[in-house]
Image: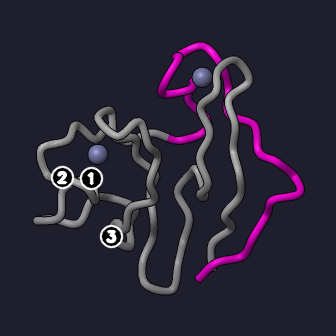
């Protein structure tokens, strides 16, 4: 099971809903990534060891041509590069 919550940036309007970091799921593990074209954070499935699954590169759900890079909430906001992402303590939701 994962823990999904609402995150918002301390210095810009950027926000997303997701885990925001690597976590273990029944089906494997997820890692979060940021699509620079969609301006969107997504949780992607990776291998059991947390690495990318060979043959399944980080890829945007919208288009394979989008630029996607690994990103986690420990890093600065992917949009403004200055703020930090803060979780809304009231938005936590268990997912599987
Ligand atoms: Zn920001
Ligand atoms: Zn995209």
Q: Quadrant of the C terminus?
A: bottom right
The residue pinned by badge 1 equals 60
Query: Seen in the image, is 13 located left or right of residue 41?
Result: right
Image: magenta residue range: 72-96
> How many neighbours does mark 2 have within 10 angstroms: few (below 14), some (14-19), or many (20 or more)?
few
Whichever of callouts 1 and 3 sits on the residue coming sooner in the sequence is 3
Judge whether residue 90 is colored magenta.
yes
**Image region (quadrant) for ligand 1:** top right
Q: Residue at x 69, y 17 (%)?
A: 11
Whether the residue carrying mark 2 lies under 8 Å from ligand 2 is answered with yes
Give left or right: position of 64 versus 96: left
Residue 69 location (% of width, % of height): 32, 38
Q: Residue at x 74, y 24 (%)?
A: 10
Marks 3 and 1: in contact by CB < 8 Å?
no
**Residue at 25% from the left image edge and 55% from the top image edge:** 62
| Element at label 1 | loop
Give the side of residue 66 with respect to residue 9, left or right. left
Asked if residue 62 is among those painted magenta in the image, a careful observer would answer no
For the point 45% across and 64% down, the residue is 30
Q: Which mark is residue 47?
A: 3
Give the left or right position of residue 64, taking residue 45 as reference: left
Using the numbered discs, state the Cα–Cα distance from disc 1 to disc 2 in whole angstroms: 5 Å
User: Can you tell which mark lies on residue 63?
Assistant: 2
Residue at disc 1, CB closer than 8 Å to ligand 2:
yes
Image height check: is 41 above or below 53? Answer: above
**Whole-percent x, y for residue 53 in the image:** 23, 66
Q: How are the colours assigned in the image?
A: one colour
Q: Are marks 1 and 2 in contact (CB under 8 Å)?
A: yes
> Nearer the observer, disc 3 or disc 2?
2
**Whole-percent x, y for residue 1 in the image:** 63, 80
Q: CA distance from mark 3 to mark 2?
A: 22 Å
Distance between the Cα atoms at labels 1 and 3?
Answer: 17 Å
């Amino acid at each position: 099971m994962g823990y999904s919550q609402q995150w918002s940036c301390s210095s810009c309007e950027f926000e997303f809903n997701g885990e925001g970091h690597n976590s273990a799921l029944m089906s494997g593990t997820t890692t979060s990534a940021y699509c620079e074209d969609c301006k969107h954070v997504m949780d992607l499935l990776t291998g059991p060891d947390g690495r990318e699954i060979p043959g399944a590169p980080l890829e945007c759900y919208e288009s394979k041509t989008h630029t996607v890079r690994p990103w986690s909430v420990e890093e600065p906001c992917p949009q403004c590069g200055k703020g930090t992402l803060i979780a809304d303590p009231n938005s936590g939701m268990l997912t599987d």
